[in-house]
Image (spheres, grey):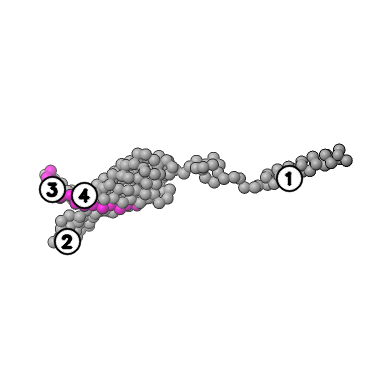
Amino acid sequence: MTSMIRPGLVLGILVVLGLGGVAHAQGYPPGPPPPGYGGGYGQPPPPEMGRMGLMFGAALGPGYMAVSCDGCDEDSLGGIGGEAHIGWMLTPRLALLGDFWGTWHFTGEFTMEHIINTFAVQFWLGRIFWIKGGLGLGVVRFHYDDFLTVESELGFSVLGAGGVELISAPRFALDVQARLGATGFDGGSVGSFGLFLGLNWY
């Protein structure tokens, strides 16, 4: 009797193991991926994980100024604008920056420039969309053909910007951005708007 039970027991174990192997081969879902990886094994972390440490960049494009003052007509002036920034990534989505922005309007007699320098915070809403806000100081200058420069006093400035990264790599990004800022003076203000194409390194 014992010799007959043992072969049956061995046969039963083999059948159970075989069914288990077939069931596994037919597609039971895999376990969770390793930390820091996507849904498929072997996929690297998203590019935003590379945004750490020093950040710097610059952008250039069309710019516009709006002038408002007591006793004068409001005016809108087209020209060119540019910005540069440097700072530090506190997290992969948050940066603290120094932002330096200029807008220039050219005529046959003089060049008018509006400069806004701010301490700014930039935050990525997702992998490629970001917003920026800053506070600082601004100035307006008039440069005449005879090398005469007339400069305003410093005024309190605000900055707001938003952009989207057209190319987003772990250490590099190409973005398009829109920015709006203003500087207030005694008796008036100057606002600037820019639509820029920018390069950034992390």
Q: Amino acid at mark 1?
A: Leu
Q: Name the foreground residue: 9 vs 155.
A: 9
Tell me how far mark 4 sits from mark 3, CA to CA: 15 Å
Give the image quarter of residue 32. top right
The circle on residue 73 is: 2
Q: Name the foreground residue: 43 vs 20.
A: 20
Q: Residue at x 40, y 42 (%)?
A: 51
> Residue 101: horizontal and vertical position, in percent?
26, 47
> Residue 173: horizontal and vertical position, in percent?
39, 43
Tell me how far mark 3 sits from mark 2, CA to CA: 20 Å
Q: Amino acid at mark 4?
A: Gly
Query: In the rendered structure, are the residues bearing label 2 and label 4 in contact, judged by CB atoms less than 8 Å apart?
Result: no
Q: Earlier in the sequence, mark 3 or mark 2?
A: 2
Tell me how far mark 3 sits from mark 1, CA to CA: 89 Å
Q: Residue at x 88, y 40 (%)?
A: 1
* Helix, strand or loop at mark 2: loop
Q: Amino acid at mark 2?
A: Asp
* Helix, strand or loop at mark 3: strand
Q: Which residue is mark 4?
A: 138
> How crowded is the residue under tag 3: few (<14 C-alpha within 10 Å), some, or many (20+)?
few
> How crowded is the residue under tag 1: few (<14 C-alpha within 10 Å), some, or many (20+)?
few
The reply to whether residue 78 is visible in this rendering is no
Q: Residue at x 33, y 50 (%)?
A: 132
Image quadrant where one finds the C terminus = top left
Q: Which residue is mark 3?
A: 150
Give the image quarter of residue 77. bottom left
